[in-house]
Image (cartoon, rainbow, N blue to C red):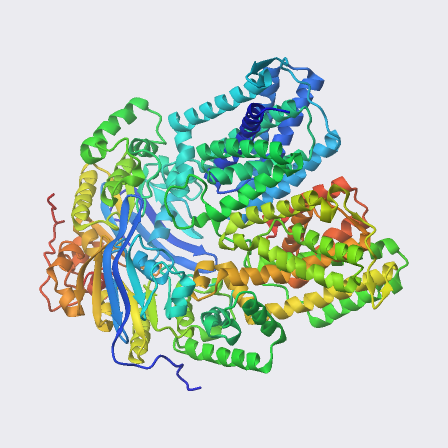
Amino acid sequence: MTNTTDNPILELDAIDTFYGPVQAHFGLSLHVGKGEIVSLLGGNASGKSTTMKIILGLVKPAAGDVRVDGVSTLKLKTPEIVRLGVGTVPEARRLFGAMSVRENLLMGAFIRNDKDGIAADLERVLTLFPRVGQRLNQQAGTLSGGEQQMVAMARALMGRPRVVIMDEPTMGLSPLWVERVLELIRDINGQGVAIFMVEQNASLALQIAHRGYVLQTGRIVLEGKAADLLVDTRIRDAYLGGAEAA
Amino acid sequence: MTSWFDHTINGLIIGNIYGLLAVGLALIFGVSRLINFAHGSVYVVGAYVGWVAVSVLQTPFPVTLVLVVALTAALGIVIERFGIRPLADAPRIAPLLATIGLSFVLDQTVQILFSPDPRSVPMQVPNWRIEIGGGSIGLLDLLIGGIGITAAASLFAFLKLTKWGWAVRATALDRDAARAMGVDVDKVNRIVFAIASALGGVGGVLVGMYYNVITPTMGFEATLKGIVAEVVGGVGNVPGAIVGSLLLGLVESYGVALLGTSYRNLFAFVLLIAILVLRPNGLFASHRQLPPEPMTGTFVAPSKPVRLPVPLVAAAAALAIALPFLTENGYLIQTLTNAWLYALLGLSLTLVAGTSGQVSLGHAALLAIGGYTSALLAFNLNWPVWLTLLIGGFAAAGIGTLLVSPAFRLRGHYVSIATLGIGEIVALVILNWESVTRGPIGVAGIPPLSLFGYDLYDTNAIYWFAFALMAALALLQVRLLGSHLGRTLRAVRDDDVAARSFGIGLKRYKGLAFAFGGFFAGISGAFTAHMYSFINHETFNTQISVLALTIAILGGMGNVGGAILGSVALIGLPEIFRVAAEYRILLYGIALLLLVRFRPQGLLGTV
Amino acid sequence: MTASFPLPTTEAPRPLLEARGLVRRFGGLTAVGGVDLSISQGELVSVIGPNGAGKTTAFNLISGLDRPDEGSIRFDDIDITGRSPEAVHAAGLSRTFQHGRVFANLSVADNVLVGAHRRLKAVKPAWPIIGPVAELALALIRPPSVKAEEAALREEVREILAIFGERLLPRIDQPAYSLSYANRRRVEIARALASRPKLLLLDEPTAGMNQTETAEMLEIIADLKARGQTILLIEHKLDMVMRLSDRVIVLDDGKKIAEGAPLVVRNDPAVIEAYLGHGGVGAAADPAAPAGPASDQPVRLSA
């Protein structure tokens, strides 16, 4: 595999992962360049969620290396990896349901101590997500799915990440919200933040991505430019997008 | 006669102290999904630190308080770091068992250091009382109330207004999401254990001053009361824990006023069972939810069980039978007789907790039911002992299963709490039902064991009888495990949702497991009663329940041979080495801690 | 016993399952918002839709694991709304689970035998106390009839496992926790088949399987269908759905947005718009159809 970016913000190098006797990754390698949007495509149980856990250090691989901007994270704990500039939009949002929207956003800035900066970023994020601003004092769990997704993205931005990893950001959303979320992902990327998103729906993911990887039973089976993948017959015949979207 | 006003004040003060415990339990449950059975022990440590400060160092009250807070907070941090954190990836019941082990260790250490005798804590507050209506409030009452309110307000401010307070709440709501935000959840746990332990320690000092007496054994009851209050308020719900505590304090205070002191705990446990059955999410749970997943998970580490070769088992059995001919040491024979009786209890629990996944903490109650039934039938009605033994077994099976049946819909920790509560209720009923059980005096002069009309006084004869019973029932259990019921019970244990989806009704099969196991335990209790010729409500206490669980875990959960081996190891070895009683309990605690941490599959492996 | 394990014989189609107006809310989210769903004897109906569309929640409502906030479910002419999973299973419904819920410490054979639990004679008596005691007695005494029944079932387990070729048979005595993800899914299907269900609910049976394994599973499901098994299927691999289904139901955001024959659903504009997003590989499964507006540049979405 050739590395097209000089210094990838995120890099997984020949990862093997095991859950007990069962192997979840087989020599998984991928990278995300600075300012890039990269999609990881794959069906349920293809190993996507484990990939997210590996990046965040919630699961440690049996072999291989994970690097954030050239720094190996294998020996780091999750908070330290987050401090390197990794923001997260977890699968199914995972907001802190019983906390207010404001508290959720401030939790996103947990690793920061610059009070003024946080306040300024809160303003900035609320300009990007005006709808969130109207609900600052509401309990996050009472929001609709789309609104929760907004809060989850806003929360991720509050940590001033250099790369945001997103696990199925459009999951469970109505078509209108899906469009809005995709547009926001592009807006976030427009501000120089790299995006690594796991998606099941290839057509959606590749629309906004620069590059893509196809993950199947723990292996990368296909990779390339999003535009190429969109028309690649192997995707059509294969496992997800094509099969999924039909 | 004391006025209702006084009972109300008394109830609120007691509730306040329960609250200091329950809030800590709720906080810990929130972030660790753990019911901390060592919490009452920290409260004991707090009380004794207070005693040392006041009586030995002669510190003024504020300094006493600061000392207690500092030392118990430090203890909390140590417990979290060395007792709980290493078990982060273990089944959820593992840290719970570890805290039980810790509580044994802490309680016994306090007992060894300060002797089991009660101590009085000199009151550091002038005994002023304000007369109101028909009753009065003392300065100490106001102080305790004030400390309770201050603690609650500070805690609320911490949780609502500070960054680490948010982190605590976020971790409680979604641990992984909090980590993804960069929260160091280990630090959150540490903070929470420190706060909870400090609150518990303060509770210990205050209760010492309020009742003017402390003992090393008061911790267990405190843990139970805190748990009851927490369950009433909704497990993990901090404001709920406060309300639950005050409610519990009032219920107890009014109950004692109506019926007498010995009924105090009965109210607490009946309230516990009622809440668990009717509103398992607490009084304040608003809407219907799917059962919370973190409560699942049984203590069965995947392992390849050791297959004992038949010749080896036969040889061991032959040796056991021949032993009385090989040794003149009557003490050894008596010790092993005891081990066979504990093995029966271990077999019972390894089936209930290991094979069917219901980690029972009230198994001693089954011994008590069997023991009392057999003793009373033989003593009052002169029925032959072989028959009363059998009836004792069936009574434990029937009554035990009936009593536990409301808990069959519960899972994980809730089962442990419910069985613990039911066990306490049985003990309290025995204590209070004097017309039948003779209450605290107990039953003395129980007829000796007899077989075919011959009384067994001979040590060796009793030994053989115990061994034969144990061996026969062990074989019966092996046969059960080899039948379709074996796989059915294990299926219930491994995944009750999937099991129900294949038509396996939980009531029927959990009931079968309890009844089968209850029979074993009942026989064991009955045998013990006739062997000792005396029992009372304390003969079969909670320590025995925990010991039984340790035996089952040591042998390997669900493992028949393991239960016997575990019993010989835990009952036989300390006797043979003549370990003093208080160190023995310490040893059991340490054994439980080490097993959970390093060898959850036990000696012979789980089945 | 014949080589193939018995399945319900095919009769004239009649409604077997009928769910009306199912609603389930979690907090601020409506996971299922008024879904109707029915399936007739011998039919294979697929439920498709993106993750989070409410498919699994709907399955949970039908199989009794969760109770609907509104709506009713009838199965085989009895009302099973809000009934327990045991009762729903007794009515003749067996399911698999999306994330694989095998009994981890049980062997493959025992897992499948649990599927046949309700068929055991010892299990039949439902009277309180007497029933369980009789069951216990039969288990301990094990008269010849019980032994014969167990032996026959073990033989049947081998036959069921044989439909997965050599995937499971060599591992028949291994504990389920040692199996690969794909094999756990197969064990779940085998377990469900051992109960001889009137209706089989399969929740993404090919999740975590590669192309070869998926093709294999497709053949197995097609074979079950050919033998008259009624199947309700959740599946993401549309290729498979198109080839197997008599009827397809499309869920999105908790609502049914389309229903009909596979071809009709695939060409339904609402489905294309909602489920497939903006074209992209929307037509991918059918290379003959005109390609969607896939462009070299990321599509600019307008609000």
Count of residue discs: 0
Q: Could you tell whether B534 is left or right of B272 in the image? A: right
Corner quadrant of residue C268: bottom left
Q: Could you tell whether C134 is left or right of A26 in the image? A: right
Location of the C terminus of chain C (image quadrant)? top left
Residue nearer the viewer, B250 or A192: B250
Residue nearer the viewer, B473 or B110: B473
Q: Is residue B2 visible?
A: yes
Most extreme residue toward the right is B328
Q: Position of residue C14 (x, y in %)?
A: 26, 75
**Which residue is depicted at the point 62% across and 55% down?**
B400
Q: Could you tell whether A122 is left or right of B65 in the image? A: left
**Which residue is depicted at the point 66% across and 57% down?**
B396
Q: Position of residue C58 (x, y in %)?
A: 30, 58
Corner quadrant of residue A83: top left
Q: Position of residue C93 (x, y in %)?
A: 36, 68
Q: Is residue A43 visible?
A: no
Give above or below for B37 relative to C238.
above
Give above or below for B558 relative to B597.
below
